């Protein structure tokens, strides 16, 4: 059983070398969702841009397509970054955040499009980007969840075969405060890079992708499509060379990954 060491805002902010993300850090013991808190804070753009909100526990954490994000209090990193008018759209923010997460978690971490981070074939972290406002007053809540101290017994039965944690994979207890600080620094770096050098971010994403050059099956508008993933376009989605012929793009909003085959032909 891991020792509970609470998140410490002072530690996280000390010597935090960032330009935007982490201008302010707030930690809640419990809340419905850090994205909910962000939605309220973001009305004040002068104070909320770059704000990072952490929670030790969420009672209504959510993932993509309304799925619930499981967490066991004090064993995860649960946070949201507020970005006001960041000059990039939600798709690119998701890509940059996913790259930042892999750089934070482990050199072997991989991205399962569009927003899952995978270690040893199992989900370890995820990103949920929500958009508020419109046109020049647009702001984003970049929600992130990382499994840190969970043991195999902590996961409910429906997640036991598909989820893991940093501690399970490393065999030692990770330092959540150091991980939180590293996450903020990586997000700050890659969000800025996404604005100035978008092609480099896409290239970095591709180098971390577990889908690129793999045979995959996706479900799109209730129909399955199988083929070889040959690339990604931030605004359009996955590019797949279909087995039935032709090349097609699949957007994140209406597409779900059903299967990913390994080189040996097994699905993961």
Image (cartoon, rainbow, N blue to C red):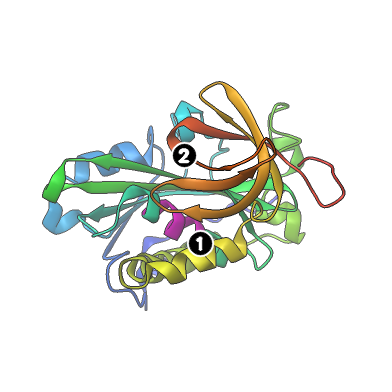
Q: Tell me: residue 170, above or below residue 70.
A: below
Q: Residue at x 27, y 60 (%)?
A: 50
Q: Residue at x 46, y 45 (%)?
A: 56
Work out whether residue 149 can be spotted. no
Residue 143 is situated, as x and y percent measured from the top left of the image, at 40, 46
Which of pointers 2 and 1 lies earlier in the amino acid sequence?
A: 1
Report whether 45 appears left or right of 188.
Answer: left
Judged by its main secondary structure, the magenta piece is: helix
Q: Nearer the viewer, mark 2 or mark 1?
A: 2
Give the quarter of the image for residue 128. top left
Disc 2 residue crowd, few under 14, some 14–19, many 20+, Cα 10 Å: some
User: Does dot 1 land on a helix, a strand or a loop?
Assistant: helix
Q: Which mark is residue 156?
A: none
Q: Tell me: residue 62, above or below residue 140.
A: above
Residue 39 is situated, as x and y percent measured from the top left of the image, at 25, 40
Report whether 189 appears left or right of 46.
Answer: right
Disc 1 residue crowd, few under 14, some 14–19, many 20+, Cα 10 Å: many
Q: Residue at x 60, y 66 (%)?
A: 207
Q: Which mark is residue 252?
A: 2
User: Does dot 2 land on a helix, a strand or a loop?
Assistant: helix
Q: CA distance from mark 2 to mark 1?
A: 17 Å
Instruction: Magenta stretch: give its range.
Output: 93-99
Work out whether residue 172 can be spotted. yes
Farthest-out residue, front: 245
Residue 121 is situated, as x and y percent measured from the top left of the image, at 74, 48
List the residue tagged with mark 1. 99
Q: Is residue 94 in the magenta section?
A: yes
């Amino acid at each position: 059983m891991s020792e509970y060491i609470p998140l410490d805002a002072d530690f996280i902010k000390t010597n935090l070398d960032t330009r935007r993300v982490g201008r302010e850090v707030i930690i809640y013991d419990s809340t419905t969702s850090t994205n909910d808190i962000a939605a309220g804070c973001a009305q004040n753009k002068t104070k909320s841009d770059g704000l990072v909100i952490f929670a030790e526990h969420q009672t209504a954490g959510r993932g993509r397509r309304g799925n619930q994000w499981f967490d066991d209090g004090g064993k995860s990193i649960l946070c949201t970054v507020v970005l006001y008018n960041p000059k990039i759209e939600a798709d690119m923010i998701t890509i940059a955040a996913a790259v930042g997460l892999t750089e934070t978690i482990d050199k072997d971490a991989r991205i399962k499009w569009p927003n899952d981070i995978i270690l040893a074939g199992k989900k370890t972290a995820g990103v949920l980007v929500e958009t508020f406002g419109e046109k020049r007053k647009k702001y984003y809540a970049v929600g992130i969840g990382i499994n840190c101290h969970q043991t195999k017994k902590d996961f409910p039965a429906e997640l036991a075969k598909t989820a893991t944690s940093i501690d399970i994979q490393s065999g030692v207890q990770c330092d959540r405060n150091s991980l939180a600080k590293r996450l903020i620094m990586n997000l700050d770096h890659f969000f800025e890079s996404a604005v100035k050098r978008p092609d480099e971010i896409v290239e970095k994403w591709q180098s971390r992708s577990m889908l690129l050059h793999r045979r995959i099956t996706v479900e799109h508008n209730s129909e399955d499509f199988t083929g070889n993933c040959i690339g990604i376009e931030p605004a359009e989605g996955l590019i797949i060379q279909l087995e039935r012929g032709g090349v097609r793009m699949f957007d994140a909003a209406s597409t779900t990954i059903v299967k990913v085959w390994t080189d040996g032909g097994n699905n993961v």
